[in-house]
Image: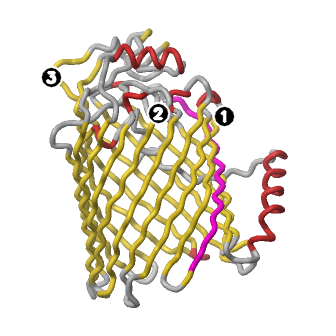
Amino acid sequence: MRKMIFRLFAFQKISNKHLLLQLILTLYLPVFLYAQIGLKLTHETLFDSNVFNNYENISDIVHQPNIHVFYQISKDNIAIQTGYNGSLVTFSESQNRQFHSHQIEIAGKHLLSKNGSSLSWGISGSKRFNKSDYDYYDNQYGNGFITYLNNTNPYRIYSFGIEGDFRKYDYLKQFNYWTAEGSIRYSIFFQSKTTLIGRWIAGFKQFTEPFYSEEEIIDVLDTYGKGKGHGSGKGSGSNQNMAEEVTQVVRIESPRQAVFKWIGILRLAQSLGSQTGLAIQGEIQKIPEGGGRFLSGQDSGYENNDVLFDDPYSYERLGASLELTKVLPWKIVGKTGFEYAEKTYDRPVYDWDGNPLEGINRSDKIKLFWLSFKKSIFLNGVIRRLVFSFNHYNASNQSNDLYYKYTQQINQLSMQLVLGP
């Protein structure tokens, strides 16, 4: 779950941002009248007590403006949308961690029957740019999917699909990969207003470059980036047994070329009235033959499922969550929930000098509490919708690798402006 792309907003009196917004509206407002071109402007602000998810507990304020321009075409039973999505991530303190990404996309939906079955598909490609200190995160990314949905039966809905992606790093070639995943989802609706949802996912990840040596990866990071490794510099965590100076550790944990995983999810949702709902979910993830490659001790790149820092193909996971949804006065949607998960990694625990502890693999226990409020205002003019939201997260990650033992609190604000169809 960690590093989802949080949609946050903070009121800022910065004239150049107001000027940019005014310019965008001036250019695009006339074409929105044709109801085929749309624009979403989002500004997010994150107050994070542990911005890089490790023992150092470095806090920061993160701003994430985003622009999404799209064009829609609909005819008979077919709809197609193309668009551009640009985002910027800036840090108030760790300014050298700033990065921006740009994505182009095309997606479509084809209704196969009048009673509800459909076929959806999409293709996207993006490029990420970092400042020089962390430009080893620079990469090109592509994704494609196709999904069949059958909801002809009002009490049974099922879907299945395939999805694939690839990532190519400008410098860390040994982490280039492609993946292929297949999934099946089945939902059952009962007259008691109970919904049972089951989902199964099988995924395969292939690294496209052979494994050479850890020294070559360290050389790449020293040449192209100046980011801190595993506890480099003076430690500032709360561990009483920690040495004052910590040696940098950068490793590829496995020379494995290919990794297979499967995930099973079961969700039970119950309506508690017209304005309240309760959901319970369990999840299991397995990697039968071990995990893939990732950089040990590398600071997070502050992205969702950072494949260098915490690759989803590198661990097994067993988790459960509880979520309560309530529609409050003024049609504010409130949610609160709790999640517990255990993760076991196919890699050893390291001491502060970078030496592996023989026979001990890393394992984490995660506790997460969240609370959110969301208000949507629908309008009839060119501005179609305003969305305001607030989210609070309180997380604890208890790990036998002390570098990854930490707590974290996040408060976030978000505003989204939607124009067009």
- The answer to which quarter of the image holds residue 309 is top left
Residues at marks 1 and 3 touching, judged by CB atoms closer than 8 Å: no
On screen, 204 above or below 376?
A: above
Q: Is residue 84 left or right of residue 53?
A: right
Circle number at residue 169: 2
Count of residue discs: 3
Q: Residue furthest bottom?
A: 114
Find the distance from the CA under tag 1 to the CA under tag 3: 41 Å
The reply to whether the magenta stretch includes residue 64 is yes
Q: Position of residue 20 (x, y in %)?
A: 80, 51
**Mark 2: secondary structure:** strand
At label 2, counting other C-alpha atoms closer than 10 Å, the crowd grade (few under 14, some 14-19, many 20 or more) is some
Q: Nearer the viewer, residue 401 or 348?
A: 348
Q: Nearer the viewer, residue 418 or 194?
A: 418
**Mark 1: secondary structure:** loop
On screen, 60 above or below 240?
A: below
Q: Position of residue 326 (x, y in %)?
A: 46, 72
For the record, the magenta segment spans 58-74
Q: Which residue in the protein does label 3 denote?
A: 359
Circle number at residue 92: 1
Find the distance from the CA under tag 1 to the CA under tag 2: 26 Å
Q: Position of residue 53 (x, y in %)?
A: 44, 34
Circle number at residue 4: none
Q: Residue at x 44, y 14 (%)?
A: 219
- The answer to which quarter of the image holds residue 148 is bottom left
Residues at marks 1 and 2 touching, judged by CB atoms closer than 8 Å: no
**Mark toward the start of the polypeptide (1 vs 2):** 1
Find the distance from the CA under tag 2 to the CA under tag 3: 33 Å
- The answer to which quarter of the image holds residue 150 is bottom left
